[in-house]
Image (cartoon, rainbow, N blue to C red):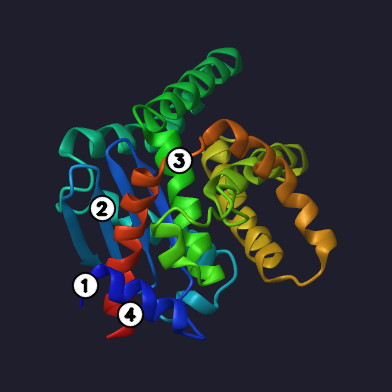
């Protein structure tokens, strides 16, 4: 099935899977619950299946959020070419390095947290990532609006801002973490910062899920800081950059529709 046919068929479907994704300096990753695709700017396309978490964890509050968070970055840690070995090492270092800060005085720990955070943000949004981040949002919005074909031709331009973007999650996890540290009821120990961090991530995932599923407009107020932050984490994509994201979308939809 050729790409134009996939886009037309998807536009005609009443029901399509919910998609997510992530932007890379050299392309866009699009994922559904079952499949992922990485379309590169040089035309290369990588495809794979998403990992399947244990069904039992999907029913356990907090654990289901952490599992979903881990699954979302699954394509990056596969030996598939989405992320090179050096990049995977950088990601793992950024994830686990803060846990070593518990052994440092508070001032040095805060400096370490800030350095890792700033360094990770600068590394993530290097190259053309900002434009491709906007392209990722536009392509997913085109799926939801059933305007894939017209978006491919540049006739329509769905929003480059997304309610489900990880930027919104990041904007929520910061205040949740600060609040969790303040109300932590147990005596502080060496492992306390690690536990509070993991618990904050799990609580934020539950909150984020509730906001996403809520039909009440008032709940969306919690997403406003993240949407505002997306003005800095996205750029208006060119048509060719949007097409890169749409190629990944078409790959996932082709397998879903089959």
Residue that badge 4 annotates: 256
Alpha carbons under labels 2 and 4: distance apart? 17 Å
Of pointers 3 and 1, the one earlier in the residue sequence? 1
Q: Is the Cβ of the residue at disc 1 closer than 8 Å to that at disc 4?
A: no
**Secondary structure beneath disc 1?**
loop
User: Is residue 8 rendered to the left or right of residue 101?
Assistant: left
Residue that badge 1 annotates: 2
**Secondary structure beneath disc 2?**
strand
**Secondary structure beneath disc 3?**
loop
Of pointers 2 and 1, the one earlier in the residue sequence? 1
Residue that badge 3 annotates: 237
The numbered disc on residue 39 is 2
Q: Quadrant of the C terminus?
A: bottom left
Q: Is the Cβ of the residue at disc 2 closer than 8 Å to that at disc 1?
A: no
Give me the residue at 64% from left, 56% from top.
203
Give me the residue at 45% from left, 59% from top.
151
Q: Quadrant of the N terminus?
A: bottom left
Of pointers 1 and 4, the one earlier in the residue sequence? 1
* 128 lies above or below 167: above
Q: Is the Cβ of the residue at disc 2 closer than 8 Å to that at disc 4?
A: no
**Toward the viewer: 120 or 226?**
226
User: Is residue 56 rendered to the left or right of residue 200?
Assistant: left
Q: Position of residue 184 (x, y in %)?
A: 72, 44
Crowd class of label 4 (few under 14; some 14 to 19; many from 20; radius 10 Å): some
Crowd class of label 3 (few under 14; some 14 to 19; many from 20; radius 10 Å): many
Q: Is the Cβ of the residue at disc 2 closer than 8 Å to that at disc 3?
A: no
């Amino acid at each position: 099935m050729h790409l134009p046919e996939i886009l037309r068929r998807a536009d005609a479907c009443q029901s399509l899977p919910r998609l997510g994704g992530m932007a890379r300096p050299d392309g866009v990753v699009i994922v559904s619950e079952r499949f992922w695709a990485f379309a590169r700017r040089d035309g290369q396309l990588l495809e794979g299946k998403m990992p399947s978490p244990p069904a039992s964890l999907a029913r356990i509050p907090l654990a289901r959020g952490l599992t979903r968070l881990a699954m979302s970055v699954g394509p990056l840690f596969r030996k598939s070419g989405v992320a090179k070995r050096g990049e995977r090492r950088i990601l793992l270092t950024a994830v686990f390095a803060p846990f070593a800060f518990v052994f440092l005085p508070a001032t040095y720990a805060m400096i370490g947290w800030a350095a890792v955070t700033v360094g990770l943000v600068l590394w993530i949004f290097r190259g053309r990532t900002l434009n491709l981040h906007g392209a990722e949002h536009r392509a997913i919005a085109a799926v939801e609006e059933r305007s894939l074909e017209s978006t491919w031709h540049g006739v329509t331009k769905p929003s480059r801002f997304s309610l489900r973007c990880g930027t919104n999650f990041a904007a929520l996890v910061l205040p949740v973490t600060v609040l969790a540290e303040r109300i932590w009821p147990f005596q502080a120990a060496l492992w306390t910062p690690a536990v509070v961090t993991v618990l904050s991530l799990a609580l934020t995932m539950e909150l984020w899920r509730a906001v996403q599923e809520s039909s009440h407009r008032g709940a969306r107020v919690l997403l406003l800081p993240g949407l505002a932050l997306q003005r800095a984490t996205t750029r208006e994509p060119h048509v060719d950059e949007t097409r890169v994201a749409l190629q990944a979308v078409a790959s996932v939809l082709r397998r879903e529709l089959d």
